[in-house]
Image (cartoon, coloured by chain):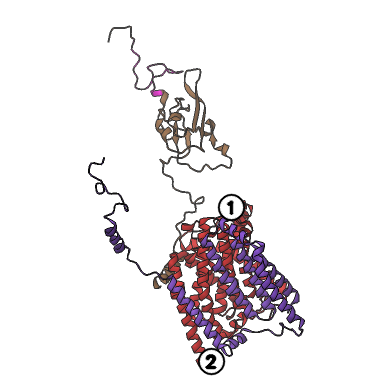
């Protein structure tokens, strides 16, 4: 019986203790830099799209929420014609980021993406594409890849030797 | 005494009592019985016996009928009980009650015909008077009924009291007693088989 | 001494009681949050005060579903019974001199009668839902409330002996010299526990017991029918607090402040105690509950009655 009264008193003393609740929208929550949140598509340092439309992210995605169509521009540079992520399906597992060979698709520390209409959860390419490089500032896929595109011939990439002329015998 | 209130309450009491008898579902019948008791309480209040009315509601409507409903709920009467009830409601079942009720009505009519039946609404009886009446002139009745209740209490306690068993020892004894015959208990490999059986 | 304006008193008390009861939903959530180091509802309106309004709108807009297997008339009438019985009890509560609907000479018995009729609401709700958890809740409610009613009445008889009346106004007047909490401390404790059990508040909320019976007797209820059970519970808390104030703490009596303010202050103090108990005490097992009622509380109530009767007979007669 005494323990009951003591319990009452102890609980009553909590009137004078600070509250542990964080008032969320006013006091924003700390989100670590590696948080797997809203997915973005990043750009080269030059401003070109990084995505080369290789479909690896769409294949890696366990819930099939990524849809894209690759195409080429006049100079032979691949890019996605459309790129669509259905965020009402996305589970933010980050497999797409792991699968991406060009660091184009990245997950950001942002989770506040509520919508009133479900259709608004489907993000198109213009919603996903950002004007920046994301987590990898200096990287440019087309500079290091040995592919010939407009303005860059074979052998002109970084750390790449000119192609060997196979018809010559001299080493 | 408010005559209109009296007649309304009396009509409700009669109607609900009829419904108590004719309902096939036990819980619904008990609900009508509770309403009937409450209307009787209103009549008591109207006749100037507020203490009696309050006790009627507290004890009959509030406790005893709730206990009945409790028991009916525990018994879990289903469709079977309703069918049995509807068999009971044949015309032949009504002969006895109708004769008895007819005798009562005839008696009441005779008394009313005698005239000089000014009952009720004389004065309000406060709880103090009830207590004084119970513990002065009717003390013997109170004591006898309290002894009766005590007996009922002891009997109920005796019925509800289980002798504390010792489950481990008892089960152990039973195990020893029944282990030779192989019909009971789990089948043991190799114990009951005849030689040469597959 | 009935109020000179009966209709004004009826509607005034009705509106105030219902407002307090629905306001209690907010008060309880805020106080529970305070004692659990949280904030509670603080978004809708100033300090979250409009939360109750939002909840009411939500309850009214919800689908009012009656299970097809339920006993429909009983299912509908069950939530009404608890509101009716508790609101009827408010008719005999003297809030201040002149603010009372009906000055009944058996007011205390009327209160006990109404609280005993309140059992029907729970039992019938549990039975008519035709759901095993609801039925278990109803059975528990019947056993619990019947057992605690017995010594609830007995624990009040000491007060009746001291004041010599069942009339609540007379009982308040009898406390002019000394509040009954001092001579009747045991009676007060017993009544507090019985009141908790009668209103099915948290230490004794076995009929609903969310963690074992999935809300027990009101599992199948939705919309405003559930809302009536909800408000009925808070009305019950208000009623029991008012009764404690009247029976043991001198009702409206107090210095300086006007009587009605004293009454409300005392009442809200006990409402706070009820909520504090909810915040801190665990739920007992059902057999413990019944054992306490019959083996501890009932003998204590009888002893209290016996001693009080002896003292009154020896010294005041």
Q: Quadrant of residue C109?
A: bottom right
Chain seen in purple: B
Residue B10 visible in the picture = yes
Q: Colour of chain A?
A: brown
State the residue in front, B187 or C310.
Answer: B187
Residue C69 is marked as 1
Please report, as a chain letter, where disc 1 is located: C
**What percent of the width, then of the height, locates residue C5?**
72, 75
Give the magenta part as a residue range. Answer: A143-165
Q: Quadrant of residue A170?
A: top left
Classify C180 as above or below A37: below
State the residue in front, B174 or B62.
Answer: B174
Chain seen in red: C
Residue A144 counted in the magenta span: yes
**What percent of the width, then of the height, locates residue C244?**
54, 75
Name the main secondary structure of what is drawn in magenta: loop
Q: Secondary structure at mark 2?
A: loop
Asked whether the beta carbons under mark 2 and mark 1 sit within 8 Å of each other, the answer is: no
Q: Residue at x 75, y 74 (%)?
A: B4
Quadrant for the N terminus of chain C in the image:
bottom right
């Amino acid at each position: 019986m005494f323990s009951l009264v003591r319990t009452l008193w102890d609980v009553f003393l909590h009137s004078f203790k600070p509250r542990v609740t964080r008032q969320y929208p006013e006091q924003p929550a700390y989100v670590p830099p590696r948080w797997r949140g809203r997915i973005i598509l990043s750009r080269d340092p030059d401003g070109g799209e990084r995505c080369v439309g290789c479909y690896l992210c769409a294949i890696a995605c366990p819930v099939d929420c990524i849809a894209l169509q690759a195409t080429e521009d006049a100079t032979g540079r691949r890019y996605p014609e459309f790129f669509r992520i259905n965020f009402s399906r996305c589970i933010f597992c980050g497999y797409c980021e792991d699968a991406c060979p060009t660091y184009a698709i990245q997950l950001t520390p942002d989770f506040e993406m509520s919508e009133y209409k479900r259709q608004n959860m489907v993000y198109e390419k213009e919603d996903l594409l950002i004007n920046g490089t994301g987590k990898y500032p200096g990287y440019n896929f087309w500079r290091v890849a040995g592919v010939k595109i407009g303005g860059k011939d074979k052998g002109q990439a970084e750390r790449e030797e000119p192609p060997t002329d196979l018809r010559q015998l001299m080493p | 005494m408010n005559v209109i209130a009296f007649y309304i309450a009396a009509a409700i009491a009669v109607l609900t009592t009829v419904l108590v008898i004719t309902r096939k579902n036990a819980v619904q019948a008990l609900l009508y019985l509770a309403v009937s008791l409450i209307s009787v309480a209103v009549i008591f209040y109207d006749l100037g016996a507020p203490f009696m009315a309050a006790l009627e509601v507290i004890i009959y409507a509030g406790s005893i009928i709730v206990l009945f409903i409790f028991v009916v709920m525990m018994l879990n009467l289903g469709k079977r009980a309703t069918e049995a009830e509807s068999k009971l409601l044949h015309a032949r079942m009504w002969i006895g009650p109708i004769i008895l009720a007819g005798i009562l009505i005839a008696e009441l009519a005779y008394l009313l015909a005698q005239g000089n039946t000014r009952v009720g609404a004389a004065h309000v009886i406060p709880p103090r008077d009830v207590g004084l009446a119970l513990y002065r002139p009717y003390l013997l009745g109170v004591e006898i009924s309290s002894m009766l209740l005590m007996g009922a209490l002891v009997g109920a306690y005796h019925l509800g009291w289980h002798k504390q068993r010792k489950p481990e020892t008892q089960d152990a004894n039973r195990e020893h007693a029944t282990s030779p015959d192989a019909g009971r208990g789990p089948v043991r490999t190799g114990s009951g088989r005849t030689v040469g059986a597959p | 001494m009935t109020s000179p304006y009966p209709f004004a008193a009826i509607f005034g008390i009705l509106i105030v009681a219902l407002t307090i009861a629905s306001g209690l939903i907010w008060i309880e959530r805020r106080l529970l949050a305070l004692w659990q180091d949280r904030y509670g509802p603080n978004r809708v309106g100033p300090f979250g005060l409009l939360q109750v309004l939002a909840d009411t709108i939500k309850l009214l807009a919800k689908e009012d579903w009656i299970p097809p297997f339920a006993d429909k008339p009983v299912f509908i009438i069950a939530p009404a019974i608890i509101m009716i019985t508790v609101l009827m009890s408010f008719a005999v509560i003297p809030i201040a001199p002149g603010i009372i609907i009906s000055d009944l000479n058996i007011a205390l018995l009327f209160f006990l009668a109404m609280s005993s009729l309140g059992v029907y609401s729970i039992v019938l709700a549990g039975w008519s839902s035709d759901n095993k958890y609801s039925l278990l809740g109803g059975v528990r409610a019947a056993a619990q409330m019947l057992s605690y009613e017995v010594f609830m009445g007995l624990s009040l008889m000491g007060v009746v002996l001291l004041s010599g009346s069942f009339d609540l106004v007379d009982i308040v007047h009898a406390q002019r010299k000394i509040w009954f909490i001092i001579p009747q401390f045991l009676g007060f404790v017993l009544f507090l526990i019985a009141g908790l059990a009668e209103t099915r508040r948290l230490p004794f909320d076995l009929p609903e017991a969310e963690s074992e019976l999935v809300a027990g007797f009101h599992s199948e209820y939705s919309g405003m029918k559930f809302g009536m059970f909800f408000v009925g519970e808070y009305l019950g808390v208000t009623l029991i607090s008012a009764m404690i104030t009247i029976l043991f703490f001198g009702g409206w009596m107090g210095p300086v402040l006007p009587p009605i303010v004293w009454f409300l202050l005392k009442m809200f103090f006990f409402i706070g105690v009820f909520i504090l108990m909810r915040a801190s005490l665990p739920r007992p097992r059902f057999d413990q509950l019944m054992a306490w009622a019959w083996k501890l509380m009932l003998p204590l109530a009888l002893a209290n009655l016996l001693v009080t009767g002896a003292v009154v007979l020896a010294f005041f007669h």
